């Protein structure tokens, strides 16, 4: 009779150990799980400190904060996974709406103007990708130069002044609804997540970032993959800028810029994408953007200085990078 409690205790110990190992695997192999847990904790904390935090009006504000970052992060993640980065995407965010406006001013329908703006955005990504791949210039340098170039083009086209967006049914569909931007962000995240995990393009993107030499020897066109992802990233930056312009009913040459770009990259890194290439998650980037949006809105409601948000964002990136490196070492040592 005394053996039953001992057996029960042993069984519970085994179950507890198995549960801990399963939880460890979840957080190591699914980085979006940990950032989701952090997001839930933040929402609960801010709701306790500010009763209006979960109100419909404030949820609209939160979604409008992070939707552009999430859209841009989706494209940036594709680039980061294959070992590159685009610092110019924040300027494309501001530039594309002006291209749309001037294309429509020539007599083209608004839809055609949007297509022209997206094509121009893609061509900017193509330019950066070609220079990076063909001339062997680091993408950090290439996109930094492109960032200054595109900013100059935006200010030249606009004269430095904002203009109103056209009030048409299409504009209302794209940006009139309070949750339109976040709906587009979620749709894009799901689409690119599917591409990354279930298509040859996604598998080749991961292979190029993880082992460029091995990928090339396996017959993967590494240059084509990198250039294609530069185009995707730039087009998403332009699309995010157009959606934002429709939402605020204004095309501002000072919108976007380095702040949007850095927050998009921060969303990607916090969501579990490695800056070293070879691994990343689109869903994690979306959740990372949401966490940053919750933080920024929560600080605003509590009257906390905006500089504190930058401190926490920078600290989160450093901690996440250190954690990612350590997790990678654990995986290489087959400890999990």
Image: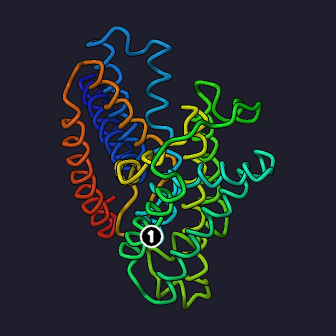
| Residue 331 sits in quarter | bottom left
Q: Position of residue 202 (x, y in %)?
A: 60, 65
Q: Is residue 71 left or right of residue 273?
A: right
Q: Is residue 38 above or below residue 105?
A: above
Q: Is residue 310 left or right of residue 170?
A: left
Depth check, front residue: 310 or 320: 310
Indicate the colouring scheme. Answer: rainbow
Whether residue 74 is visible: no
- Residue located 62% across and 46% down the image: 190
Q: Position of residue 25 (x, y in %)?
A: 38, 50
Q: Secondary structure at mark 1?
A: helix
Whether residue 67 is visible: yes
- Residue located 38% across and 80% down the image: 138
Mark 1 highlights which residue? 146
- Residue located 59% across and 36% down the image: 164
The residue carrying pointer 1 sits among few (fewer than 14), some (14 to 19) or many (20 or more) residues within 10 Å by Cα, namely: many
Quadrant position of the C terminus in the picture: bottom left
Quadrant position of the N terminus in the picture: top left
Q: Is residue 156 above or below residue 230?
A: above
Q: Is residue 82 left or right of residue 19?
A: right
Depth check, front residue: 135 or 295: 135
Q: Position of residue 47 (x, y in %)?
A: 33, 15
Q: Position of residue 117 (x, y in %)?
A: 66, 56
- Residue located 59% across and 73% down the image: 126
Q: Is residue 187 left or right of residue 75?
A: right
How many numbered badges does the structure rendering display?
Answer: 1
Q: Is residue 259 above or below residue 7?
A: below
| Residue 280 sits in quarter | bottom left
Find the residue positioned furthest to the top. Answer: 51
Depth check, front residue: 54 or 336: 54
Q: Is residue 134 above or below residue 98?
A: below
């Amino acid at each position: 009779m005394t053996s039953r409690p001992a057996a029960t205790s042993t069984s519970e110990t085994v179950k507890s150990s198995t549960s801990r190992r399963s939880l460890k695997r979840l957080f190591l192999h699914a980085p979006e799980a940990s950032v989701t847990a952090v997001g839930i904790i933040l929402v609960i904390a801010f709701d306790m400190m500010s009763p209006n935090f979960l109100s419909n009006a404030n949820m609209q504000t939160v979604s409008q904060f992070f939707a552009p970052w999430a859209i841009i992060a989706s494209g940036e993640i594709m680039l980061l996974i294959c070992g590159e980065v685009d610092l110019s995407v924040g300027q494309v965010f501001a530039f594309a709406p002006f291209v749309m406006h001037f294309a429509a001013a020539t007599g083209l329908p608004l839809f055609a103007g949007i297509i022209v703006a997206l094509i121009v955005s893609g061509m900017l990504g193509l330019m950066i990708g070609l220079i990076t791949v063909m001339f062997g210039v680091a993408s950090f340098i290439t996109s930094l130069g492109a960032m200054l170039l595109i900013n100059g083009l935006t200010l030249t086209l606009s004269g430095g002044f904002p203009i109103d967006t056209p009030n048409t049914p299409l504009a209302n569909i794209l940006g009139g609804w309070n949750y339109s931007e976040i709906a587009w962000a979620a749709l894009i995240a799901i689409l690119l997540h599917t591409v990354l995990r279930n298509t040859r393009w996604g598998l080749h993107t991961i292979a190029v970032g993880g082992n460029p030499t091995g990928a090339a020897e396996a017959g993967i066109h590494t240059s084509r993959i990198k250039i294609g992802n530069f185009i995707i990233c730039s087009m998403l930056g332009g699309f995010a800028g157009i959606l934002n312009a429709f939402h605020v009913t204004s095309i501002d040459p000072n919108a976007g810029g380095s702040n949007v770009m850095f927050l998009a990259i921060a969303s990607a890194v916090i969501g579990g994408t490695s800056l070293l290439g070879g691994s990343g998650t689109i869903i994690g980037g979306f959740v990372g953007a949401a966490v940053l949006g919750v933080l920024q809105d929560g600080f605003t409601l509590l009257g906390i200085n905006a500089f504190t948000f930058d401190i926490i964002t920078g600290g989160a990136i450093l901690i996440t990078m250190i954690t990612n490196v350590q997790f990678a070492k654990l995986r290489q040592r087959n400890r999990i």
